[in-house]
Image (spheres, helix red, strand yellow):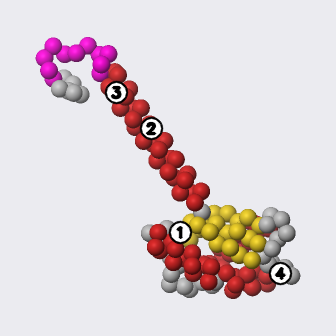
Amino acid sequence: MLASTIQKELATMMLRDLNDPRLPSIVSITRVKVSPDLSIADVYVTIMGTPGQQTAALNALKHSAGMMRTKLTKALTLRQAPFLKFHIDEGLKKELAVLDLLDQVAKENAEIDRKRAEAQAPAPSEGAGAGGEE
């Protein structure tokens, strides 16, 4: 509950209040994990761009964490907001890598099935070449 509220508030702040040139236009907060004692909020973000741009954007977010924490305290009417720790969400990269691997396996399976079908089909008496249909 608190994590999702923090996520929404931070996303709004990033759009409205942060004018850092290191931040690209596309920064998404994928998830927020709040520690059991509510002292720390781990904020996971995805940032479009090169690894260098991602590092610069992450540094910009870390630099503005104090200001965002102050605004978060006021917006959520908390006595004290958790410390914000920003991280690049590696989970999304891993998911995309798995999807790419699955796509590659599907293509390889289709190629194997095609070769199997060619091997089982009666070969034409004159060499028509691979995949040549009349």
Q: Which residue is mark 1?
A: 47
Question: Which of the labelled discs sits on residue 80, or is there none?
Answer: 4
Whole-angstrom CA distance, mark 4 to mark 1, is 28 Å
Please name the residue shown 47% across and 69% down the image: 51
Q: Is residue 86 left or right of residue 99?
A: right
Name the residue carrying label 2: 105
| Image point (79%, 84%), residue name | 74
Pointer 3 residue: 114
Question: Are dots 1 and 3 in contact, CB under 8 Å?
Answer: no
Instruction: Tell me if residue 6 can be seen.
Output: yes
Q: In front: 87, or 122? A: 87
Q: Secondary structure at mark 4?
A: loop
The CA distance from mark 2 to mark 3 is 14 Å
Residue 14: percent from the left, percent from the top?
62, 78
The reply to whether the C-beta atoms of the residues labelled 2 and 3 are less than 8 Å apart is no
Exactly how many numbered labels are in the figure?
4
The answer to which of marks 4 and 2 sits earlier in the sequence is 4
Check residue 97 for magenta coloring: no
Question: Magenta segment range?
Answer: 118-128
Which mark is first along the chain, 3 or 4? 4
Residue 117 at what x, y percent from top left? 34, 21
- x and y, in percent, of residue 30 in the image: 63, 63
Report if the CB atoms under discs 4 and 2 are less than 8 Å apart.
Answer: no
The kind of residue tagged 4 is: Gln
Give the answer, above or below, for where 44 lies relative to 112: below
**Residues at discs 4 and 1 in contact (Cβ within 8 Å):** no
Rounded to the nearest angstrom, the CA distance separating label 4 from label 2 is 50 Å
Secondary structure category for the residue under label 1: strand
Mark 2–mark 1 Cα distance, whole angstroms, equals 28 Å
